Amino acid sequence: MSQNVENRPDTRLPIPLTTLIGREREVTEGLRLLQQNEVRLLTLSGPGGVGKTRLAVTLAHQVRQNFADGVHFISFASIHDAAFVLPSIAQALRLQGGGSFSPLEHVKSFLQEKQILLLLDCFEQVISAAPLVVDLLTTCPLLKIVVTSRETLHVRGERILSLSPLPLPDVQLLADETVAQYSSVALFVERAQEAYPAFQLSAENAPIVAEICRRLDGLPLALELAAARIRLLSPQELLERLTRRLPLLTDGPRDLPPRQQALRTTIQWSYDLLSADEQRLFRIITSFACGCTLSTLEAIYGMLDGEVSFVVEGVSSLLNKHLLYQEEQGERQLLMLATIREYGRELLLACDEWEEVMNRQAEYYVQLVEEAANLAYGSEQERAFDRLEGERENLRAVLRWLVERGGAMEMALRLIGALSQFWLVRWYISAERHWVEQALADGADVAPAIRALALRAAGWLAFVQDDGIRAEQHYRESLKLYEELGEPRGQAATLHWLGSLALTMRNDSETARSLLDASYALAVSANDRVAQELVYTTRGNMALNQGDFNTAQTCFEHSLVLSKAINNKKHLARALRGLGHTRLMQDDVEGARAYIEESLALSREVKDLLHTAYALDLLGLLTLAQNDATQARTLLEEALVCTRTLGVQRRVAYALAHVARAAAVQGDIEGARSRYEESLCLFREVGDATGAAASLQDWGVLLARQGNLQGCARLWGAAQDMLDRIDPAKPLPFSLSIERITDTEYEHMLAEVRAQLGTQAFATAWEEGRTMTPERILADQPTNHIIVQPTRKSNLTDRESEVLALVAQGRTDAQIAEALVISPRTVHAHLRTIYRKIGVTSRFAAIHYWSNPPTS
């Protein structure tokens, strides 16, 4: 056989012009595999834009010395017919004419004794030619092949190296300098500097860059395309434009293949390789806000008149092509990268399928939630609620869609009513409360039974978010409907919560007792043991607050018996904590600890975050009273984490004050100060004068320990002024109770400081404090915790000045985010930068700076 080839080893590989970032592990693993004699076929697989070709080229360059007869790169990016695979390989090998041999035999004959590495790029285009690859390998013993493909070849002997997007930082947990260590951030920064050499990662923009990387899923191509925009947009401007990713991620380098010049083209490349049925399944999956389970997808696909038996096959294909990925979240979740989901949703809308798919989703989720709500307490309901936890973003999206589209208020209120049981059991702090309120406003004509239950759900959401006024309004309207319907269970539940609100908002024990008695009577008549148990617990708390410990214990014990009878672990945990609190007030510390620890374990078991926080807080205060400040602070810090997660700011303020108290006992003065400052800020934001006064009293105790007697007297005077201004006849707006234990340290310290200062000096300082605003109080405290002197206001950017001005108006992070159309996380990042620039560490100090800027 005649072969017209050059008689020298031939290596033809692209020369990378940029550094490979973040693939050290994959390079090491790829080299390890290629060095093994038994590994002949290595497939680099992953979604479009993840960097398969770049990695393959790097591997080929590093092993080329091991292949005496050369390394050859063959791209199939422009080939769609598997019949052209063999001619493309022959052309790369510079084979001309095979005489009487077939093209396949000609290539085999040439490769028979050659030590060659073939790099076959974009093989997903010609995946049906996979058997040809195996044929070459079985015939040519020294041949090795590296394939890049969005889909694995699924043949014998194939070893797979899967590429995932680059690791992402958690901007909530990491310091600025740590963010730079993540490869997704490093890639973005290097490519941004190529486009705009002056760009630098800084403490100011690091959180914003980290969020950009998260928005882009850590996908290398997306990061590179976004980084190129830095020549025109600041990181903040870029982030704000990423609400829609695909229109922005275009205009890649002209020397790259078209598929890599725009992210939309890259994804379309994968989509076009799907069959018509796979494309439809892909579009349906993109309708889910946070992915779905296989069983959910099968149900909805069937509701859309699809062949359910195809779903497993179709999902397998999408997984193989890296358009889907899986995560273990109890039941496996089928998920998509955000950029891929955005592309699919565009198609769903373009194909006029969005409304039909969302209708079927709504029907499915309403039925799913109603079935879970109707289950009896116990392990079966807990599993059902675990399932709903995994679907929370989908449930939120469906509710929003039902409300926004209009004309579907009955289904929206059905969903809200069914979710009430889930919210009740899990103390689920709902981010979709706005949509609940809107659905009620637009659904005035919905059937009374549906509306009454939805009102109870809305009342509960308001209750757990500490909005007592709105909770009371919803419960009253719900009660009226239940009375008209003659439905005793609904009446019993709403009367109980109205009784609870009478206590927390008005401290009106007489009205509360009347409402609770009416609730209990209806609950007994309807054999509603849940409502009976709730009434006993609330009666117990009322007796506890009034110092009637015997009655409190009796009520909590009744609650305990009922909770065990119906296997309601959530309510059992509340009753146990009530008993623990009662024992604590009776000075039975060990008995109290046992009850509270059991309550904590149950609350954790049922994933009841609020009552977990309550138990941790009470246990921490108990431990602090026993002079174990280290363990107490650990417990109280954990309680603080729970309350921050829940987002109820008044609860956060109390948790901060309790942590500050433990820090002060430990001698961590700066830690205590910063916690007191933050708690005072939050108490002022939510309008809780009682909490603010208690925080100032504790802070005064800290100053007294430091010997600052006039300072502590002023704080105590300010605290008393706050208490004196409270109108006992005016209802408080809060719904959540605050559990306290007796603390006599303030009274003891008050007498001691008065004695040391003298009556006249003490009275003078006290009166000075009564005239001081919270800002003045903070400004007058020693500022040894401030590291640098404030710089001039002009050092802030325009956006930072806007943020600080809104902070000075008393706005919360969420309110600032809404006003400036940015995310709360971005507000948080701005505040960190502002604090650093002006040299403060607290919100109140920043407010003081804004009001009294330095003159030089």
Image (cartoon, helix red, strand yellow):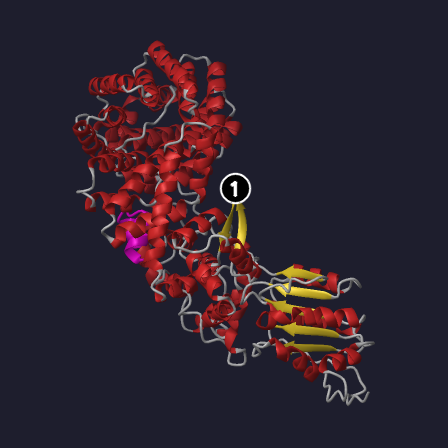
Is 142 situated above or below 321?
Answer: below
| Image location of residue 706, percent across then percent down | 43, 31
Q: Nearer the viewer, residue 79 or 650?
A: 79
Magenta highlight range = 804-821
Please, which residue is most extreme toward the top here? 550
Picture coordinates of residue 347 (x, y %)? 39, 65
Q: Residue at x 34, y 41 (%)?
A: 430
Image position, residue 637 (x, y; %)? 47, 34
Considering the image in quadrants, where does the N terminus appear? Answer: bottom right
Q: Is residue 293 visible?
A: yes
Q: Image quadrant of residue 683?
A: top left
Query: Is 369 a magenta residue?
Result: no
Q: Could you say which is closer to the camera, residue 779 or residue 532?
A: 532
Residue in front for this viewpoint, 37 or 757: 37
Magenta segment, prevailing SS (helix, strand or loop) = helix
Circle 1 crowding by C-alpha within 10 Å: few under 14, some 14–19, many from 20: few
Task: Quickly name the residue at label 1.
Answer: 330
Three-letter residue code for mark 1 = Gly
Q: Is 614 situated left or right of 764 in this image?
A: right
Image quadrant in which the C terminus is located: bottom left
| Residue 776 spot, x, y in % from top left | 29, 41
Q: Is residue 652 visible?
A: no
In the picture, residue 677 is in which quadrant?
A: top left
User: In the rendered picture of this protein, how many numbered marks are placed on residues?
Assistant: 1
Q: Residue drawn 38% across and 62% down?
A: 348
Examine the rendered structure and indicate whether residue 93 appears above or below residue 176. below
Q: Is residue 320 left or right of residue 615?
A: right
Compared with 39, 487 (above or below) is: above
Q: Quadrant of residue 423?
A: top left
Q: State the residue in front, 75 or 174.
A: 75
